[in-house]
Structure formats: C-alpha cells, structure tokens
Amino acid sequence: MSLFSPLLFPVYCRENIIFVLDETALPFDENYVKVGKLSEALDVLGQMKTRSLGQVLLFFYSCALFNEAENAYGIAEEFLKIRPTFDFMFIAGMIEKQKERGVKPIDAAKFFIDHFDKTRRTRAKVLAGQLPQDAKIATVCNVNGELIYLYEELISAGKKCEFIVCETRPYLQGTRLTFWELTKNDIPARLCCDNQISWIMKNGGVNCVVTGADRASVKGDIINKIGTYAISRAAHEFGIPFYALTQYPRDIDIDTIKIELRPANEVFMYIDNDKIFHGDALYPCFDVVKGEYITKSVDLNNPGK
Amino acid sequence: MEEITNMIVVWGNVQAAGFDVLMHEDSGVIVCEQRPFMYGLSVAGQLKNKGLKVLYCSDNALGFLFYNKKIDKVYVFYEQKKDNKVICQSGTYYLCLLARQHNVDIIFSEGINIKDSKDLRGPDAGSIFSKSFVMAKNTDKYIIKPEREEILIEEFRS
C-alpha cells in the first residue's frame, strides 16, 4: 500500500525559498505560495493558507531564512501576533537549543520533519492497536495526512475502518482537506455537517473519535479546532472513546491560553455576499477540551503511554 | 468576548408567532447558520430587522459558547409535535444535548411546518447553496444525508 497526501508535508524549502501549500485553495487547486521574506510568511499564516503542521514548518524555515529578528524568539513573537493560540515560543526554544549546540536552523528543521514523520507513523500504529475491529471513526478538521497512516496501520492489523468526517465550518477543513485526502486515496469516508455528529453517535454510526490537538497540557487537556468540544461531550454522553493526537504537552492551565478570534466576515466563508447576514458574527477558531472528556491522549513522543 | 452575556440561542425555522415571542425577550440572540439548510441567514436578518441584538455564528461554535457560559436559554422552533416528541430539522439534537449538558433551559416552540417537503436530499454537507466542495463522484455514497430528528421532550426538560 502506498498512499499519499500533500498535506503530510504542506511546507517545504528549496534554494532559500519557502513553498507553502495553499490549503484554502484545496481541493480544487493544488497551489504552492512562494515565501521569500518574513512579512510574506506572516501573510500566508494570517490568510489561513497554512495551519497545524504547516505553520510549524513555516516557522522553522522562517527562523532559518529570515534575519529580521535577533533570534527564533523574535520570529515567534511575530507569529504569535497572527496566531496567538499556538505555542511558537516552545518551538523557538527548541531551535535556540539546537543553535547552542551548533546546529543550523535549516538542519534543525530537516531533523524535526524527519523525526516528526517517523514518530507520527509510530503513533498511528499504536492508536490502530487500540481502535475497534470495525472502527467507525469520527474526526474533525485535518491532521495533515495522519489518518492515512492510521488507515494503513488498521488494515495491516486486519481491522476494518470508515471515517466520519465533520465538515468543520466555516473553513471546511474537514470537507476540503480530510475528506478530500481520504477519498482521493480510496479510503472509506463519509462526510457530515458538524451539527449531525451527535445524532449519528446516538444512532450508533460512530464507535470512536480521533482528533488532533493544537495545544496540550500535561493534565490531559487540549485545545483543538472549533467544534471539537461538542464532539467530545457527545462522545462522552454515549460512551464512545475519544482519542486526541497530541504533541509536546506543557505544564499549563489550558484555560489561560488565548483563543484566537478570527475576523467576523470569515463566518460566511464560501457564501455569496448577497446571501450573507450583515450584522455581528463570531468566529472563535478553537475549543478547549478538558481531560475528563478525553479517553486517551496519544502523544507523539510517547504514544504507548 | 466579555460583552457577550446572557444570550438566547434561536434554532429552527421561526414563524411569525415565534418572532413575537422573541421580541419579548430582554436578551441578545445567537443565531447559528443551521447547516445544511442555512436557515440561520434568513432568521438572523429578520430578527435584526425587528431590532433585536443578533450574533451570528457557525453551528460548531455552540460548544465554545456553552463552555464559556454565554448562553442562558435555548429556543427550538420545531416542525411538528407528536405526543411527547417534536420533529425538528437536522442538528437540533446537537444543540439540545449541549444545552442539557450545561444546564441551560430549552423552550420548544412551534416553527414553520415543512412536513410537505419530504425531500431532504437537496442541501447536504457536500455543498453550500449550489457550490460543491466534494471532488468525489457518486456523492450519495459519501455524504450522510440530513435527517429530521425526533426529540423526546422529556429528555431535555430541566
């Protein structure tokens, strides 16, 4: 089996230019935006052209290529102005430590990508071992191709699976990214509106949930894409196990993290202007999910724990 | 976010009498888009025109709003009532479950009865209005169609 998604590696660097997969153009166009300076990196981040793993890779390469800031912490400050919920300072700390050891940021980036890919494969294998024999997996947003690894591991373990993908309004990352990459690889998947998931669970259409996590605490709490909280509560209601794919959990109070509020007009993404509501709107980008609603955090660096 | 307090969620296809009820509420109103039908766009506009303070959001933001204790009450405008059940549009159970889990009262009120419209195959998760976001062919196989949801009133009585 050889399955692939461009979302597995959404950002790469060649000859001092960063290439960023424009996730807002998917599934219709597979375009890469060229980034040659820090302001352009911040623009693609602000325009939601990349997120999740892409924003980490963009940050690594920005630290390697751009010298507008004195060090990685300075670049992190700029990234945080755009995306306050993500812990760029932690990644900056990793880069600065490597620099102290004489490792160049570009080499630190290459090491990170290689290590990340190997460990997420391991994580997928560990998780596959824990999912039901006939897994009906609800998911939200997008975990950069890791569901493809999970599918491969489930099949190799002799299990069957189907993904139930929540569309993830307003940016439709569930539809445009996850559902697209799964169906493109002929992986069984069905799509639903975000608000259908509780009814589907009530009627036995889901027997486990797998989501990503943008932030995680050592206490087991996470922050993930808007909609994750409602899914976790519905899963808890029906005794359905909820697995969060986490990385680098920190000793933090998750409720103190600032949740990014995106511009109100983004609530109306993909709706023609003549049909939208011209009034106040709210788009909180992320949800907090407390550990009591998470069956298990499958962490990148210690998936078997 | 601080200024958002004591809000009422309005869900369903509100009829004229429903608007009158809401006019007597002394609170701001949250209207969700209500995928895939997008009733929220119309309801939000009508409530705003009647002078209510309206905040619009996607359906999946409801969890965030309940978690942050922004919601005091929920109005569900159902399509039909049968004995101890109400028949509602797709997504109603999602809202009711969150409301119950956060100890928020739900008021079931009669909305527009679209029982004649048996065909729910029109809008679904694959598209918004006429724009499709699914590349796969034979989408009937891939998209979970919205269903009317039967809500047992007793299950959600405070």
Image: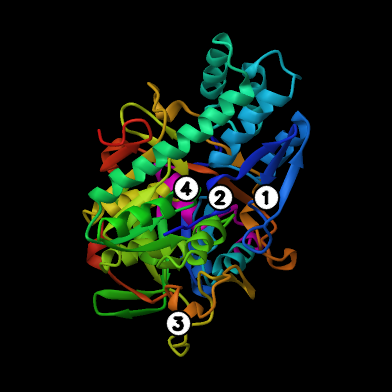
Q: Nearer the viewer, mark 1 or mark 2?
A: 2
Q: In the orientation shown, which residue stands out farthest toward the front?
A: A1
Q: Residues within 10 Å of mark 1 (few under 14, many from 20)?
A: many
The residue segment tinted magenta is B47-73
The reply to whether label 3 and label 1 mark residues of one chain is no
Between A248 and B144, the residue placed more toward the observer is: A248
Between A77 and B65, the residue placed more toward the observer is: A77
Q: Are marks 3 and 1 in contact (CB under 8 Å)?
A: no
Q: Do the residues labelled 3 and 4 touch (CB within 8 Å)?
A: no
The reply to whether label 1 and label 2 mark residues of one chain is yes
Q: In the orientation shown, which residue stands out farthest toward the top?
A: A100
How far, Cα to Cα, is label 3 from label 1?
43 Å
A217 with respect to A281 (left or right): left
The chain letter for the residue carrying disc 1 is A
Q: Mark 3: which amino acid?
A: Asn
Q: Which of marks 3 and 1 is in front?
A: 1
How far, Cα to Cα, is label 3 from label 2?
44 Å
> Which image quarter: residue A220?
top left
Magenta-span inclusion, residue A295: no
Above or below for A163 versus A98: below
| Element type where label 3 sits in the image | loop
Between A140 and B11, the residue placed more toward the observer is: A140
Image coordinates of residue A10 in percent, x first then y, are 60, 45
Tell me the residue at 46%/73% (across/down): B143
Image coordinates of residue A134 in percent, x first then y, are 25, 64
The chain letter for the residue carrying disc 3 is B
Q: Residues within 10 Å of mark 3 (few under 14, many from 20)?
A: some
The reply to whether label 2 and label 4 mark residues of one chain is yes
Q: Mark 2: which amino acid?
A: Leu
| Element type where label 2 sits in the image | helix
The chain letter for the residue carrying disc 4 is A
